[in-house]
Image: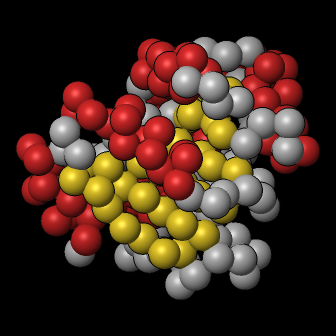
Amino acid sequence: MEWVLEQAPPQRQIALFSATLPAPIRRIAHEHMREPRQITIENRASTAPKIRQRYWLVSGLHKLDALTRVLEAERFEAMLIFVRTKIETSELAERLEARGFNVAALHGDIPQQQRERTIAALKSGQVDIVVATDVAARGLDVERISHVVNFDIPYDSQTYVHRIGRTGRAGRSGEAILFVAPRERNMLRIIER
């Protein structure tokens, strides 16, 4: 992005639109724009009506066992599992593979071409389970995702809504499961609002 901006003529108009505006993008905007203005449109986060939401109280040590039970007991077409970090993404995918599940990891450090192959495999049914970070799954639109599992509880309700919004698309129903450790009950109350 910076290279493109550096190639543009000095007299130019720049407009930047984004659903989110993380710090690195704000920095680029301030470096390359004169008197940038930020317009924020607040909306109350709401979930699709056809998404059935539930939570499980799970001890951190038993989360993998709980997830294994979900994978064995739930009838799903495709499942997206959210964790907080890139490292957790790869580790959880490896642990699930060791338990016999066909799973792929999706995070920002995976080369773009590999991420595209993973998404294509998910769409085609070659892979039914993807473990992802929020950033990697942003904008992901795969119709066959019937279940979203929040293996790690999100920090805010807006992230929760974005995560579970990967299911229940195009009028279809979906399932959202949230794992909550005892120490995370306050975060659950924030999401429930």
Res 161 quadrant in image: bottom left
- Residue 124 visible somewhere in the drawing: yes
Say if residue 134 shows up in the picture. Answer: no
Quarter of the rendering occupied by the C terminus? bottom left
- Counting every numbered tag in the picture gives 0
Looking at the image, which is closer to me, 184 or 140?
Answer: 184
Q: Is residue 53 left or right of residue 164?
A: left
Instruction: Say above or below: 162 vs 34.
Output: below
Q: Residue at x 43, y 35 (%)?
A: 83
Q: Vertical placement of 123 versus 193: above or below? A: above
Task: Name the spot of residue 25 as percent of width and height, x first.
Answer: 52, 32
Q: Position of residue 41 (x, y in %)?
A: 45, 69
Asked whether, in this view, residue 193 is left or right of residue 27, the answer is: left
Considering only vertical position in the picture, is 53 above or below 18?
below
**Of residues 12 and 42, the one drawn nearer to the viewer in this rendering:** 42
> In which quadrant is the N terminus drawn?
top right
* Quarter location, residue 7: top right
Q: Identify which residue is drawn at 75% across, 26% down.
A: 115
Q: Hey, which quadrant is residue 22 in on the image? A: top left
Q: Position of residue 33 (x, y in %)?
A: 57, 35
- Residue 21 percent location from the top left of the image: 48, 44
Residue at 64 percent across and 60 percent down: it is: 75
Pick the residue in front: 180 or 96: 96
Colour scheme: secondary structure
